[in-house]
Image (tube, rainbow, N blue to C red):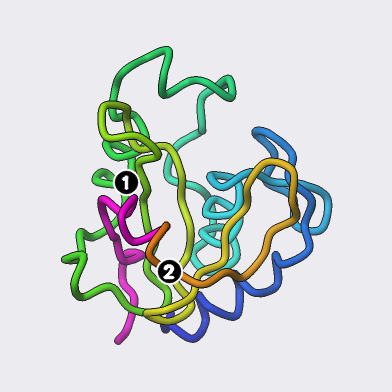
Amino acid sequence: MTRADIVAAARRWRGTPYVHQASLIHVGCDCLGLVRGVWRDIIGDEPEAAPAYTPDWAEALSAETLLDAAHRHFRVVALSDFREGDVLLFRFREHLPAKHLGIAISTTHMIHAHAGACVAQVAIGPHWRKKLVAAFAFPNVVD
């Protein structure tokens, strides 16, 4: 699979409504559901089942659940070196676990899902850059 394949798969999800815990293209997804759906599109079966989670799971658990899962299934990329097709992980508050994902479609834009909106392409501007804590490449991606 190539980075172009990942970007094309992510772009197909644009317009999908936000639905907490869902991962069905054009039906509904959250940020994790978007990444899970792109994984299924480009790789196949998901490597592990996502546990049930509440909207405030990160605050309630105070554990780096999402970051730990990313380390299990993706290849770490230096923040300064992320490229199109990489998964980006964000922390909304310094003292809380990382809890938001997006897929870079370039070094300046990403596709992501967030509450109250459909999956969309957005700029990775100063707001997102200061919250970015990790970047990961899909396994076996061809550069």
- 135 on left or right of 102: left
Instruction: Give the crowd class for mark 2: few <14, some 14-19, many >=20 residues within 10 Å.
Output: few
Q: In the picture provided, is 134 more to the left or to the right than 61? A: left
Instruction: Tell me which label, 1 or 2, sits earlier in the chain.
Output: 1
Q: CA distance from mark 1 to mark 2?
A: 23 Å
Q: Dot 1: what SS?
A: helix
Q: Residue furthest right?
A: 27
SS of the residue under disc 2: loop
x%, y% of residue 60?
42, 12
The type of residue carrying mark 1 is Ala
Instruction: Tell me if residue 52 comes above or below residue 91 in the rendering.
Output: above
Q: Specify few, some or many for label 1: CA neighbours under 10 Å numbering under 14, 14-19, or 20 or more.
A: many
**Is residue 139 located in the magenta-colored stretch of the structure?**
yes
> Would residue 51 appear left or right of 26 to someone viewing this image?
left
* 1 or 2: mark nearer the eye: 2
Q: Nearer the viewer, residue 123 or 45?
A: 123
Q: Position of residue 38 (x, y in %)?
A: 56, 62
Q: Is residue 103 left or right of residue 96?
A: right
Tell me where the magenta segment starts and ends, as one range.
Answer: 128-143
Q: Quadrant of the N terminus?
A: bottom left
Q: Amino acid at mark 2?
A: Gly
Q: Is residue 84 above or below residue 131?
A: below
Q: Position of residue 33 (x, y in %)?
A: 60, 46
Q: Quadrant of the C terminus?
A: bottom left
Q: Which residue is mark 2?
A: 125
